[in-house]
């Protein structure tokens, strides 16, 4: 082996001291994320102009704010990819305490920023921070570390599972108080997915899952507006000008798109007919402008991203890097569930609930923390590749 190759090999083995070899990162995942973010910017230009004009700001107002969020998220991802997973595992309890305090703080009148009756944001000099986005990532980190430390207890004793459910229940209750039912569902689903992959017996897992579904169901039905959404979801055309308004307009958008769409920028539903066309219903506009083919393409991109992330987790688990594996599984559930719920709502398969489409919807806080989670995944993939001598893309990196 040449001296240059030897130096490069040493740089890989001592990645914490020197610049790591790019060959050890999952370039396919990086490319898929970049493509998704670029598609998001294109759709933002196409969908946000009308709402920006209505609010008296530049038609590129949301575009530039999304660019800014991309910069912050990318910066944090580049920082976190240099931090060892072992160090990340130690901050689990601390980050849960911080998130819990922020979720309480957001409910207090002096600190919260209310939008459409929901108190989900903390307001700082013209910028808002949404603690629920940090909460979802915090649960992934905390549970990954917990499942490593108490793996045997979680697998064999009910008390281990109860401890996990207790943490999820507290955070879900704080989210429901905002109210943010969608984030509660994603957080609970992500946590349960991680528990299942940690090896909890099927019967015990199903019992816990049934309990969580029951609690979320009760929470959905006790609030009149949530019950109305469920009823309208079953037949949105019955009250198309009130409770079924969003879904009917989303379905109209998808119907107009047919197979190949009406073309970028030619959406009619985004012209004040479809509420939150640049955030909660961006997939419907994608279906209108890019057609069924474009909508399926977006779904396939998310399937690919989730698969690549899950693949890194499997590789990490094979070499005994359990914290990295569980954390990576959690991120795959986090992104996959958000995308699934967003698409399901837009297609009318799920009750109407506001959740952004990762990487694509205008949602600065969501974008920042999703990119940060991708950085964590890439770090796990790098450490796995260094340990095994093989890149996550398959085969040895080029010497």
Image (cartoon, helix red, strand yellow):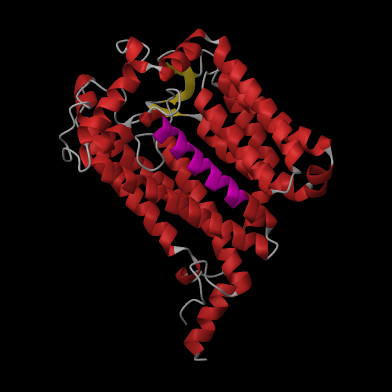
Query: Is residue 47 among what the camera can see?
Result: yes
x%, y% of residue 140? 61, 42
* Stretch of the chain drawn in magenta: 327-344
- Of the pair 92 and 17, the residue shown nearer to us: 92
Query: In this picture, is 163 found above or below 391?
Result: above
- Left or right of 231 in this view: 159: right
x%, y% of residue 392? 52, 66
The reply to whether the magenta stretch includes residue 337 is yes
- Of the pair 298 and 92, the residue shown nearer to us: 298
Give the mark count: 0
The residue positioned 59% from the left and 35% from the top of the image is 189
- Left or right of 40 in this view: 108: right
x%, y% of residue 214? 65, 22
- Of the pair 47 and 215, the residue shown nearer to us: 215
Query: Is residue 83 among what the camera can see?
Result: no
Task: Spot the residue most to the top.
Answer: 224
x%, y% of residue 268? 17, 27
Characterize the magenta stretch by its predominant secondary structure: helix
The reply to whether the magenta stretch includes residue 227 is no
The residue positioned 67% from the left and 53% from the top of the image is 323
Which quadrant would residue 321 be assigned to in this image?
bottom right
């Amino acid at each position: 082996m040449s001296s240059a190759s030897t130096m490069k090999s040493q740089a890989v083995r001592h990645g914490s001291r020197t610049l790591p070899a790019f060959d050890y990162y999952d370039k396919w995942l990086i490319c898929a994320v970049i493509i998704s973010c670029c598609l998001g910017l294109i759709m933002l230009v196409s969908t946000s102009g009308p709402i920006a004009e209505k609010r008296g700001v530049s038609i590129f107002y949301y575009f530039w704010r999304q660019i800014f969020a991309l910069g912050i998220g990318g910066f944090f991802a580049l920082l976190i990819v240099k931090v060892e997973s072992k160090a990340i595992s130690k901050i689990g309890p601390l980050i849960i305490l911080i998130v819990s305090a922020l979720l309480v703080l957001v409910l207090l009148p002096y600190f919260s920023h209310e939008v459409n009756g929901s108190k989900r944001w903390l307001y700082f000099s013209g910028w808002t921070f949404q603690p629920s986005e940090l909460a979802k990532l915090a649960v992934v980190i905390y549970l990954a570390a917990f499942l490593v430390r108490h793996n045997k207890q979680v697998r064999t004793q009910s008390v281990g599972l109860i401890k996990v459910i207790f943490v999820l229940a507290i955070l879900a209750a704080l989210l429901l108080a905002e109210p943010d039912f969608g984030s509660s569902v994603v957080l609970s689903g992500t946590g349960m997915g991680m528990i299942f992959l940690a090896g909890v017996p099927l019967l015990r897992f199903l019992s816990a899952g049934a309990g969580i579904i029951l609690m979320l169901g009760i929470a959905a039905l006790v609030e009149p507006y949530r019950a109305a959404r469920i009823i309208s979801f079953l037949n949105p055309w019955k009250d198309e000008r009130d409770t079924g308004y969003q879904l009917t307009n989303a379905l109209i958008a998808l119907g107009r798109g047919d197979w190949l769409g009406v073309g970028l920028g030619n959406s009619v539903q985004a012209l004040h007919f479809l509420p939150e066309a640049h955030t909660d219903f961006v997939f419907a506009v994608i279906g209108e402008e890019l057609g069924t083919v474009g909508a399926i393409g977006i779904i396939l991109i998310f399937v690919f991203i989730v698969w690549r992330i899950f693949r890194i987790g499997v590789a990490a688990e094979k070499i005994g890097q359990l914290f990295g594996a569980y954390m990576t599984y959690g991120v795959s559930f986090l992104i996959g569930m958000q995308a699934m719920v967003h698409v399901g709502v837009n297609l009318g398969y799920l009750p109407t609930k506001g959740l952004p489409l990762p990487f694509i919807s205008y949602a600065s806080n969501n974008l920042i923390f999703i990119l940060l989670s991708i950085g964590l995944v890439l770090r796990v993939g790098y450490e796995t590749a260094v340990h095994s001598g093989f890149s996550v893309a398959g085969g040895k990196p080029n010497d």
